[in-house]
Image (tube, rainbow, N blue to C red):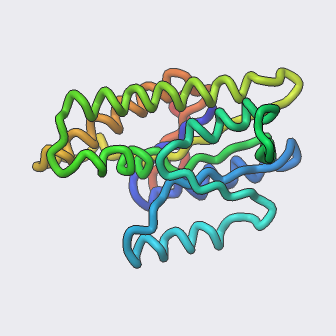
Amino acid sequence: MILVLGGTKSGKSSFASRRAAGRENLGPVTYLATALAGDGEMKDRIARHQADRPSSWITVEEPVDPAGYFTDLIDVTTKKTPPAVPATVLLDCITLWLTNLLTPMGDEPNRGQALELGRKEVRRLVDEILAWESGDPSLDREAIIVSNLVETGLISPWPLGRIFQDLAGLTHQMIAAEANEVFLLTAGLPQRIK
Protein backbone atom coordinates (compact mmCIF):
# COMPACT_ATOMS: atom_id res chain seq x y z
CA MET A 1 0.00 0.00 0.00
CA ILE A 2 1.24 3.44 -0.95
CA LEU A 3 -0.17 6.67 0.49
CA VAL A 4 0.26 9.84 -1.58
CA LEU A 5 -0.47 13.07 0.30
CA GLY A 6 -0.40 16.70 -0.82
CA GLY A 7 -2.31 19.93 -0.98
CA THR A 8 -4.64 21.03 -3.75
CA LYS A 9 -2.89 20.96 -7.15
CA SER A 10 0.30 19.62 -5.55
CA GLY A 11 0.68 16.94 -8.24
CA LYS A 12 -0.39 14.02 -6.06
CA SER A 13 -2.87 12.50 -8.55
CA SER A 14 -0.37 12.79 -11.42
CA PHE A 15 2.35 11.18 -9.31
CA ALA A 16 0.01 8.37 -8.24
CA SER A 17 -1.08 7.82 -11.85
CA ARG A 18 2.53 7.52 -12.99
CA ARG A 19 3.17 4.95 -10.24
CA ALA A 20 0.10 2.97 -11.31
CA ALA A 21 1.06 3.18 -15.01
CA GLY A 22 4.48 1.80 -14.13
CA ARG A 23 2.78 -1.34 -12.83
CA GLU A 24 0.62 -2.08 -15.89
CA ASN A 25 3.00 -4.85 -16.94
CA LEU A 26 1.88 -6.73 -13.79
CA GLY A 27 -1.81 -6.70 -14.72
CA PRO A 28 -4.85 -4.46 -15.02
CA VAL A 29 -5.12 -1.10 -13.25
CA THR A 30 -8.36 0.02 -11.66
CA TYR A 31 -9.04 3.68 -10.90
CA LEU A 32 -11.33 3.70 -7.85
CA ALA A 33 -13.00 7.12 -7.93
CA THR A 34 -14.72 8.59 -4.87
CA ALA A 35 -15.80 11.97 -6.29
CA LEU A 36 -19.41 13.05 -6.62
CA ALA A 37 -20.21 15.61 -9.31
CA GLY A 38 -22.20 17.98 -7.11
CA ASP A 39 -21.71 21.09 -9.26
CA GLY A 40 -20.39 22.21 -12.65
CA GLU A 41 -16.84 22.85 -11.45
CA MET A 42 -16.63 19.36 -9.94
CA LYS A 43 -18.04 17.84 -13.14
CA ASP A 44 -15.27 19.60 -15.09
CA ARG A 45 -12.62 18.38 -12.63
CA ILE A 46 -13.87 14.79 -12.92
CA ALA A 47 -13.90 15.05 -16.73
CA ARG A 48 -10.28 16.28 -16.72
CA HIS A 49 -9.20 13.37 -14.52
CA GLN A 50 -11.04 10.92 -16.78
CA ALA A 51 -9.40 12.38 -19.90
CA ASP A 52 -5.94 12.04 -18.32
CA ARG A 53 -6.40 8.33 -17.53
CA PRO A 54 -5.16 5.65 -19.92
CA SER A 55 -8.05 4.04 -21.80
CA SER A 56 -6.79 0.60 -20.70
CA TRP A 57 -7.63 1.35 -17.07
CA ILE A 58 -10.87 0.19 -15.51
CA THR A 59 -12.78 2.99 -13.76
CA VAL A 60 -14.97 2.10 -10.79
CA GLU A 61 -16.98 4.86 -9.15
CA GLU A 62 -17.48 4.21 -5.45
CA PRO A 63 -18.09 7.43 -3.54
CA VAL A 64 -19.35 5.85 -0.29
CA ASP A 65 -17.97 2.31 0.13
CA PRO A 66 -14.51 1.80 -1.37
CA ALA A 67 -13.90 -0.99 1.17
CA GLY A 68 -16.77 -2.88 -0.43
CA TYR A 69 -14.95 -2.83 -3.76
CA PHE A 70 -11.96 -4.59 -2.18
CA THR A 71 -14.32 -7.03 -0.44
CA ASP A 72 -15.79 -7.86 -3.85
CA LEU A 73 -12.29 -8.45 -5.25
CA ILE A 74 -11.53 -10.86 -2.41
CA ASP A 75 -14.88 -12.66 -2.74
CA VAL A 76 -14.91 -13.01 -6.54
CA THR A 77 -15.85 -16.69 -6.29
CA THR A 78 -19.18 -15.78 -4.67
CA LYS A 79 -20.20 -13.25 -7.35
CA LYS A 80 -22.34 -14.09 -10.37
CA THR A 81 -20.42 -11.49 -12.36
CA PRO A 82 -17.02 -11.18 -10.69
CA PRO A 83 -15.15 -7.90 -11.10
CA ALA A 84 -11.95 -7.86 -13.13
CA VAL A 85 -9.17 -8.47 -10.64
CA PRO A 86 -6.53 -5.75 -11.02
CA ALA A 87 -2.88 -5.86 -10.03
CA THR A 88 -3.09 -2.19 -9.03
CA VAL A 89 -5.90 -0.11 -7.58
CA LEU A 90 -5.51 3.67 -7.55
CA LEU A 91 -7.97 5.08 -4.99
CA ASP A 92 -8.49 8.81 -5.58
CA CYS A 93 -9.25 10.26 -3.11
CA ILE A 94 -9.66 9.68 0.62
CA THR A 95 -10.75 13.21 1.53
CA LEU A 96 -13.56 13.18 -1.04
CA TRP A 97 -14.70 9.86 0.41
CA LEU A 98 -14.60 11.29 3.95
CA THR A 99 -16.68 14.24 2.73
CA ASN A 100 -19.24 11.79 1.35
CA LEU A 101 -19.35 10.00 4.72
CA LEU A 102 -19.80 13.20 6.74
CA THR A 103 -22.25 15.09 4.48
CA PRO A 104 -25.34 13.06 5.48
CA MET A 105 -24.63 13.95 9.13
CA GLY A 106 -25.48 17.64 8.54
CA ASP A 107 -23.62 20.90 9.10
CA GLU A 108 -23.03 20.33 12.82
CA PRO A 109 -22.75 16.58 13.38
CA ASN A 110 -22.10 15.02 16.74
CA ARG A 111 -18.30 15.08 16.91
CA GLY A 112 -17.93 11.75 18.69
CA GLN A 113 -20.30 9.94 16.34
CA ALA A 114 -18.66 11.42 13.25
CA LEU A 115 -15.13 10.51 14.34
CA GLU A 116 -16.22 7.03 15.39
CA LEU A 117 -17.94 6.41 12.05
CA GLY A 118 -14.83 7.63 10.26
CA ARG A 119 -12.46 5.48 12.32
CA LYS A 120 -14.62 2.41 11.79
CA GLU A 121 -14.89 2.91 8.03
CA VAL A 122 -11.19 3.74 7.62
CA ARG A 123 -10.18 0.64 9.61
CA ARG A 124 -12.50 -1.45 7.43
CA LEU A 125 -10.98 0.05 4.26
CA VAL A 126 -7.40 -0.53 5.42
CA ASP A 127 -8.18 -4.11 6.48
CA GLU A 128 -9.84 -4.92 3.14
CA ILE A 129 -6.94 -3.41 1.17
CA LEU A 130 -4.39 -5.41 3.18
CA ALA A 131 -6.42 -8.61 2.73
CA TRP A 132 -6.64 -8.03 -1.03
CA GLU A 133 -2.92 -7.20 -1.35
CA SER A 134 -1.89 -10.36 0.51
CA GLY A 135 -4.66 -12.60 -0.83
CA ASP A 136 -2.59 -14.42 -3.43
CA PRO A 137 1.13 -14.54 -2.64
CA SER A 138 1.95 -15.33 -6.28
CA LEU A 139 0.55 -11.94 -7.38
CA ASP A 140 2.09 -8.52 -6.81
CA ARG A 141 -0.96 -6.47 -5.83
CA GLU A 142 -0.74 -2.87 -4.69
CA ALA A 143 -3.14 -0.13 -3.69
CA ILE A 144 -2.09 3.47 -4.28
CA ILE A 145 -4.12 5.86 -2.15
CA VAL A 146 -4.36 9.60 -2.82
CA SER A 147 -5.48 12.12 -0.22
CA ASN A 148 -5.50 15.88 0.35
CA LEU A 149 -3.40 17.07 3.25
CA VAL A 150 -6.00 19.32 4.89
CA GLU A 151 -4.89 19.00 8.48
CA THR A 152 -1.80 21.20 8.10
CA GLY A 153 -3.65 24.46 7.45
CA LEU A 154 -5.52 26.80 9.72
CA ILE A 155 -8.10 25.31 12.02
CA SER A 156 -11.54 25.67 10.49
CA PRO A 157 -13.89 28.18 12.14
CA TRP A 158 -16.85 25.82 11.56
CA PRO A 159 -17.60 22.66 13.57
CA LEU A 160 -17.96 20.48 10.46
CA GLY A 161 -14.64 21.78 9.11
CA ARG A 162 -12.85 20.99 12.37
CA ILE A 163 -14.33 17.50 12.48
CA PHE A 164 -13.32 16.96 8.85
CA GLN A 165 -9.73 18.13 9.48
CA ASP A 166 -9.43 15.92 12.56
CA LEU A 167 -10.88 12.92 10.74
CA ALA A 168 -8.56 13.45 7.75
CA GLY A 169 -5.53 13.67 10.03
CA LEU A 170 -6.50 10.52 11.96
CA THR A 171 -7.23 8.74 8.67
CA HIS A 172 -3.83 9.64 7.26
CA GLN A 173 -2.17 8.33 10.43
CA MET A 174 -4.06 5.03 10.21
CA ILE A 175 -3.23 4.49 6.55
CA ALA A 176 0.40 5.63 6.91
CA ALA A 177 0.93 3.17 9.78
CA GLU A 178 0.05 0.28 7.44
CA ALA A 179 1.52 1.65 4.21
CA ASN A 180 4.78 0.39 2.75
CA GLU A 181 5.53 3.83 1.35
CA VAL A 182 4.22 7.35 2.03
CA PHE A 183 4.91 10.30 -0.26
CA LEU A 184 4.31 14.02 0.27
CA LEU A 185 3.89 16.10 -2.90
CA THR A 186 4.75 19.79 -2.96
CA ALA A 187 4.80 21.80 -6.21
CA GLY A 188 4.81 18.54 -8.17
CA LEU A 189 7.87 17.24 -6.35
CA PRO A 190 7.53 13.98 -4.42
CA GLN A 191 9.29 13.48 -1.10
CA ARG A 192 9.28 9.97 0.30
CA ILE A 193 8.57 10.20 4.03
CA LYS A 194 8.23 6.47 4.70
Q: Residue at x 28, y 31 (%)?
A: 115
Which residue is farthest front?
Answer: 80
**Total numbered circles:** 0
Residue 13 visible from this viewpoint: yes
Q: Residue 118: x and y, percent?
A: 36, 33
Q: Residue 73: x and y, percent?
A: 73, 37
Residue 191 visible from this viewpoint: no
Quadrant where the C terminus lies?
A: top right
Q: Between residues 93 and 76, which one lies in front from this camera angle?
A: 76
Q: Residue at x 21, y 50 (%)?
A: 106
**Res. 66 image quadrant:** top right
Q: Between residues 150 and 33, which one lies in front from this camera angle?
A: 33
Q: Residue 42: x and y, percent?
A: 43, 70
Q: Residue 174: x and y, percent?
A: 44, 25
Q: Is residue 18 left or right of residue 66?
A: right
In the image, residue 91 above or below residue 124: below
